Structures are given as C-alpha cells and as structure tokens.
C-alpha cells in the first residue's frame, strides 16, 4: 500500500514529507549539534526519503534503481549517509545489522573467523534472512511473514512494549492450565504479544490440546484420555465468531485463525532457513549462531521456537537475541567512517535467493505448515 500510494508524484511527495519530518524531529532532539546522520532503511523507505520513484519495488521483475551506500544532501538536515541496499526487499537495515555483528565485535573490519557462518534473522511483517558464510560472501532471502510477529492482526494481539505494561509476553502452566507470566501483581492483561502467542501455543502443545498440525483437540474421547491438568484446561475451549478458540479468561483467547497465522510464519521461517543452508551446502550443525533481531528476539523463549518447529533443537542453544541490530550498526557506521567502504563492497557481493520462484514452492510451504 505504501508503494502504491507513492506511485504518483503527489503521493510520493506526501510520504517523503512525513519521512523527513521524522528525521527532523530526531535532528531537533539532538540539539542541532549533529554533523551527519546515518540512515539504515529498507529499500522502500530509502527511496521515499530521497523522493525517488520506487517503480522497481512495485511489480515484477523487481529491481533496485538506487543502491544506497552513498552520502545525500536534504534541505534542512545535516548530510545523510544511507546504508547500502542489498536487493529489492533486503535493505540497509540488514546491511547495518551485519556491520554490527561483523565489525562491532572487534571494532575493526576484520571479524574473527570463528564468527562464521552465522544467520541473521530480522522478523517483522517482512522476514529478512542473511546467511553470512565468511567475511566476503553471504546469501540472503526475503519472505513475507505478515504482521503476526509484531502482535498485529491477531485476535488479541498487542505490542510487547506498550504504555500500560500489561501485555502478556509469556505463559506458564498453572493449576488450571496456561496462565500469564511476568505481569505486575494485580495487573489486568490487555493483550497478547507475538512471544505471548508462541508461548501459549507451546503450552497447549504440551497439554495435548493442540496437535502438530495446528488443530485444537476438542473431541471428548481424546480429551478424556489426557492428564487431569489437560482436561481442566480443555474447559477453556469455546466457539467464538464461528470458530474454535481457547480462552484463558473471559476476554483474551487464541483462535484457530490465530494458529494458522503463526503456522504461516513458522513455514516461512523454516523454508528460509532450509533454503539458505541447502544453497550453501551446510547442515544445521554448521551454523555457529542464529542472531534474532528486533523485539521478538529480545522477548522470545528459544524453547518455544524449538518446540514449535522454527528451529531444530540442535540450534536452540545457538540462538542469540541482538535487539535493534540495525540501529546498533548505524551507530557504529556513524562513528567509524572507515567501515563504510568495506560494507559497500560486501553488500555488492551478497546473493539473494528467490525461494518463491523455485519449483514446488507452494507444496513445500504447505508441507511446512505444522509444528514439526
């Protein structure tokens, strides 16, 4: 919708104005003492900030008309340096994240050999995955994940960080089944974050109330064979808005549609991981680290990811949350101009895979929509 709105010159200028206002606020908050700004942006935002037509991002065959990795001048702002764009849907936020991981560890452009190979996964509405093989070569893939991992589009979804601090980010098993964990005493939960939903599904799997195919177990004969705690928790099943849902109180629940949305995310994650490893000729055991960027990485329990099939158990202990790695990389590149040229050379050599164009992709996707 953003790219479609920017197809015309008037829409493009309106979105550019909004983007520049955001940069101006940052500049003003810094007390006007900023000599230069480093921008780590996805390809769409990089084009909008500069007022460039993003026709190459709107329709196939997708292509970049602007590669970033350059200084820009914008009226009313200090000079900008935009992190290099890798491909139409893998942008400067990923190249900045790579810079933080590869250069920020030692403060030089010669990362330790033991770092590689590693996977950087930035999970938002769009999932961007980077498999860094060594300091000179990497593979990337981008797949749409939808808004579920940002707490949006779910029946009771909410951001992990909200003003009330009453979003549920995890569950634990209590005397009546899954119950919210980590809320302040007396707090009334107002929503469930993405990590909260993942935790809830893991607990329902443990209880036998959700099967590996993502279906709720509601028939009385199956429930009667379960443990007492599972039978007690099964009382939370109701038909709501024409579909089965599991309620843990009168207003908050997970529906069959919610489960399906998270299954789509899991399938995309699995196909991205397996596709990159296959192309590189690596096994799971060959990965040294899996870096999870963003809020999800900060809040998720790696046990939930392994139990739901996002990653094999082998990789659970190698998952490292890195938070806002693109911001950390931008900060590094602002302070260390000598790292920019090596980063641009590296970005130019990254090869992006188009998994959706592979024969049988839709069959593979359907076969991955399970918690295995």
Image (cartoon, rainbow, N blue to C red):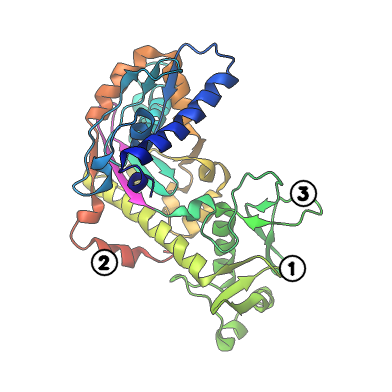
Q: Mark 3 and mark 1: span between their CA atoms?
A: 19 Å
Residue wearing tag 3 = 184
Residue 249 x, y percent position in the rendering: 71, 68
Q: Is residue 270 above or below residue 214?
A: above
- Contact between labelled residues 2 and 3, with CB atoms less than 8 Å apart: no
Q: Residue furthest bottom?
A: 221
| Callout 3: SS | loop
Q: Mark 1 and mark 2: span between their CA atoms?
A: 41 Å
Residue wearing tag 1 = 175
Q: Left of 154 or right of it: where is 88?
A: left
Magenta residues, as a range? Answer: 131-144
Q: Is residue 57 above or below residue 367?
A: above
Residue wearing tag 2 = 363
Residue 209 x, y percent position in the rendering: 57, 74
- Contact between labelled residues 1 and 3, with CB atoms less than 8 Å apart: no
| Callout 2: SS | helix
| Callout 1: SS | loop
Are there few (<14), some (14-19), or many (20+) residues within 10 Å of tag 1?
A: few
């Amino acid at each position: 919708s953003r790219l479609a709105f920017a197809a015309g010159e008037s829409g493009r200028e309106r979105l550019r104005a909004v983007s520049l206002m955001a940069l101006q606020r940052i500049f003003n908050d810094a007390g006007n003492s900023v000599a230069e700004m480093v921008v780590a942006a996805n390809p769409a935002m990089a084009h909008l900030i500069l007022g460039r037509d993003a026709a190459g991002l709107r329709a196939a065959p997708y292509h970049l008309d602007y590669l970033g990795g350059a200084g820009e001048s914008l009226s009313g702002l200090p000079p900008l340096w935009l992190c290099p764009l890798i491909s139409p849907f893998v942008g400067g936020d990923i190249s900045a994240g790579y810079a933080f991981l590869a250069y920020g560890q030692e403060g030089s452009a010669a990362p330790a050999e033991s770092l590689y190979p590693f996977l950087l996964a930035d999970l938002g509405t769009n999932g961007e995955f980077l498999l860094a093989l060594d300091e000179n070569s990497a593979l990337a893939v981008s797949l749409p994940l939808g808004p579920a991992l940002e707490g949006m589009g779910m029946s009771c979804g909410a951001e992990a960080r909200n003003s009330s601090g009453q979003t549920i980010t995890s569950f634990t098993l209590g005397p009546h089944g899954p119950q919210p964990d980590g809320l302040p005493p007396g707090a009334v939960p107002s929503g469930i974050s993405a990590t909260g939903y993942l935790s809830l599904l893991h607990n329902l799997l443990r209880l036998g109330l959700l099967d590996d195919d993502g279906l709720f177990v509601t028939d009385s004969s199956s429930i009667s064979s379960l443990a007492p705690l599972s039978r007690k928790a099964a009382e939370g099943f109701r038909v709501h808005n024409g579909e089965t849902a599991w309620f843990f109180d009168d207003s908050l629940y997970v529906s069959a549609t919610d489960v399906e949305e998270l299954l789509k995310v899991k399938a995309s994650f699995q196909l991205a991981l397996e596709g990159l490893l296959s192309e590189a000729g690596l096994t799971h055991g060959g990965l040294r680290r899996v870096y999870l960027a963003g809020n999800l990485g900060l809040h998720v329990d790696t046990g939930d990811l392994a139990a739901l099939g996002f990653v094999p158990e082998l990789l659970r202990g190698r998952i490292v949350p890195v938070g806002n790695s693109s911001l950390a990389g931008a900060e590094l590149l602002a302070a260390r101009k000598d790292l920019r040229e090596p980063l641009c050379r590296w970005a130019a050599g990254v090869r992006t895979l188009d998994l959706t164009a592979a024969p049988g992709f839709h069959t593979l996707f359907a076969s991955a929509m399970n918690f295995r």
